[in-house]
Amino acid sequence: MSGYLTTHVLDTARGCPAAGLKIDLYRIEGEARTFLRSLVTNADGRTDSQILPAEDFATGTYELVFHAGDYLDANGTAPESPRFLDVIPLRFGMSEASHYHVPLLLSPFGYSTYRGS
Protein backbone atom coordinates (compact mmCIF):
# COMPACT_ATOMS: atom_id res chain seq x y z
CA MET A 1 0.00 0.00 0.00
CA SER A 2 1.31 3.43 -0.83
CA GLY A 3 0.66 6.47 1.31
CA TYR A 4 -1.12 9.71 0.53
CA LEU A 5 -2.52 12.77 2.33
CA THR A 6 -5.99 14.34 2.23
CA THR A 7 -7.97 16.91 4.20
CA HIS A 8 -11.51 18.15 4.70
CA VAL A 9 -12.31 21.59 6.12
CA LEU A 10 -15.67 22.26 7.74
CA ASP A 11 -16.89 25.69 8.83
CA THR A 12 -18.55 24.82 12.14
CA ALA A 13 -19.86 28.37 12.69
CA ARG A 14 -21.77 28.39 9.40
CA GLY A 15 -22.53 24.66 9.40
CA CYS A 16 -21.10 23.96 5.95
CA PRO A 17 -17.96 22.88 4.09
CA ALA A 18 -15.27 25.58 3.90
CA ALA A 19 -15.10 26.18 0.15
CA GLY A 20 -12.35 28.39 -1.27
CA LEU A 21 -9.88 27.99 1.60
CA LYS A 22 -6.21 28.02 0.52
CA ILE A 23 -3.94 25.33 1.96
CA ASP A 24 -0.14 25.15 1.64
CA LEU A 25 1.89 21.99 2.22
CA TYR A 26 5.49 21.97 3.48
CA ARG A 27 7.96 19.20 4.26
CA ILE A 28 9.97 19.72 7.44
CA GLU A 29 13.53 18.35 7.70
CA GLY A 30 15.39 19.60 10.75
CA GLU A 31 15.25 23.39 10.54
CA ALA A 32 14.45 23.36 6.81
CA ARG A 33 10.87 24.02 5.70
CA THR A 34 10.34 23.19 2.01
CA PHE A 35 7.22 24.35 0.16
CA LEU A 36 5.63 21.49 -1.81
CA ARG A 37 2.30 22.78 -3.16
CA SER A 38 -0.72 24.97 -2.68
CA LEU A 39 -4.35 23.89 -3.15
CA VAL A 40 -7.80 25.40 -2.57
CA THR A 41 -10.80 23.59 -1.13
CA ASN A 42 -13.78 22.90 -3.39
CA ALA A 43 -17.52 23.20 -2.64
CA ASP A 44 -17.30 20.08 -0.44
CA GLY A 45 -14.44 21.54 1.66
CA ARG A 46 -11.97 19.05 0.13
CA THR A 47 -9.21 19.53 -2.41
CA ASP A 48 -9.82 18.26 -5.94
CA SER A 49 -6.71 16.11 -5.73
CA GLN A 50 -4.78 14.53 -2.89
CA ILE A 51 -2.64 17.05 -1.04
CA LEU A 52 0.28 14.64 -1.18
CA PRO A 53 -0.37 11.93 -3.78
CA ALA A 54 1.08 8.42 -3.60
CA GLU A 55 3.76 9.12 -6.22
CA ASP A 56 5.17 11.95 -4.03
CA PHE A 57 4.61 10.34 -0.64
CA ALA A 58 7.49 9.92 1.78
CA THR A 59 7.37 9.40 5.52
CA GLY A 60 8.48 12.33 7.62
CA THR A 61 7.28 15.56 9.16
CA TYR A 62 4.93 17.85 7.26
CA GLU A 63 3.04 21.06 7.83
CA LEU A 64 -0.34 22.06 6.45
CA VAL A 65 -0.96 25.81 6.55
CA PHE A 66 -4.63 26.77 6.41
CA HIS A 67 -5.30 30.38 5.36
CA ALA A 68 -8.33 30.79 7.62
CA GLY A 69 -8.31 34.59 7.83
CA ASP A 70 -8.68 35.03 4.07
CA TYR A 71 -11.48 32.45 4.05
CA LEU A 72 -13.30 34.15 6.95
CA ASP A 73 -12.94 37.56 5.28
CA ALA A 74 -14.34 36.22 2.00
CA ASN A 75 -17.35 34.71 3.77
CA GLY A 76 -18.50 37.77 5.64
CA THR A 77 -17.16 37.06 9.12
CA ALA A 78 -16.96 40.40 10.91
CA PRO A 79 -13.37 41.65 10.56
CA GLU A 80 -11.06 42.16 13.50
CA SER A 81 -7.69 43.83 13.52
CA PRO A 82 -5.79 41.67 13.97
CA ARG A 83 -8.03 38.68 13.26
CA PHE A 84 -7.99 36.12 16.11
CA LEU A 85 -7.36 33.23 13.69
CA ASP A 86 -5.51 34.09 10.52
CA VAL A 87 -3.02 31.43 9.43
CA ILE A 88 -3.29 28.00 11.09
CA PRO A 89 -0.17 25.81 10.82
CA LEU A 90 -0.58 22.11 11.64
CA ARG A 91 2.68 20.16 11.94
CA PHE A 92 2.41 16.38 12.02
CA GLY A 93 4.34 13.21 11.24
CA MET A 94 3.60 10.43 8.80
CA SER A 95 5.46 7.31 9.91
CA GLU A 96 4.15 4.68 7.50
CA ALA A 97 2.83 4.37 3.97
CA SER A 98 -0.92 4.65 4.55
CA HIS A 99 -3.75 7.12 4.05
CA TYR A 100 -3.34 10.14 6.30
CA HIS A 101 -6.43 12.34 6.55
CA VAL A 102 -6.02 15.60 8.49
CA PRO A 103 -9.37 17.43 8.75
CA LEU A 104 -9.87 20.92 10.16
CA LEU A 105 -13.01 22.02 11.98
CA LEU A 106 -12.96 25.81 11.83
CA SER A 107 -14.81 28.73 13.41
CA PRO A 108 -13.72 32.37 13.79
CA PHE A 109 -12.49 31.79 17.34
CA GLY A 110 -11.36 28.17 17.42
CA TYR A 111 -10.42 25.06 15.51
CA SER A 112 -9.73 21.39 16.05
CA THR A 113 -8.09 18.63 14.09
CA TYR A 114 -7.45 14.90 14.39
CA ARG A 115 -6.18 12.00 12.30
CA GLY A 116 -9.24 10.96 10.36
CA SER A 117 -9.91 8.04 8.10
Image (cartoon, rainbow, N blue to C red):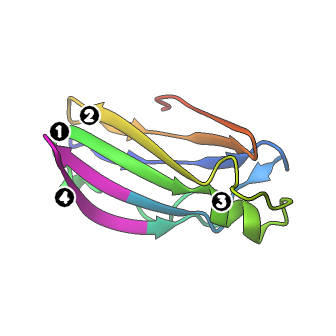
Disc 2 marks a residue whose amino acid type is Met
Q: Which residue is mark 3?
A: 69
Task: From the viewer's side, name the closer residue of 70 and 112.
Answer: 70
Q: Residues within 10 Å of mark 4 (few under 14, many from 20)?
A: few
Label 4–label 2 contact, CB within 8 A: no
Amino acid residing under circle 1? Thr
Instruction: Kindly identify which numbered label has been placed on residue 55.
Output: 4
Q: CA distance from mark 3 to mark 1?
A: 30 Å
Magenta span dominant secondary structure:
strand
- Mark 4 or 1: in front is 1
Residue with the mark numbered 2: 94
Of badges 3 and 2, nearer the viewer stands 3
50 or 93: nearer the viewer: 93
Q: Circle 3 — which element?
A: helix
Q: Earlier in the sequence, mark 3 or mark 1?
A: 1
| Mark 3 and mark 1 residues within 8 Å of each other at the beta carbon | no
Q: Position of residue 107 (x, y in %)?
A: 75, 44
Residue in view at x 73 percent, y 59 percent: 81
Which quadrant of the figure has residue 90? top left
| Left or right relative to 23: residue 45 | right
Which residue is under mark 1?
Answer: 59
Magenta stretch: includes residue 110: no
Which is more toward the observer, 38 or 50?
Answer: 38
Q: CA distance from mark 4 to mark 1?
A: 12 Å
Disc 2 from disc 1: Cα separation: 5 Å
Dot 2 surroundings within 10 Å: few (below 14), some, or many (20 or more)? some
Q: Which residues are magenta?
A: 25-38
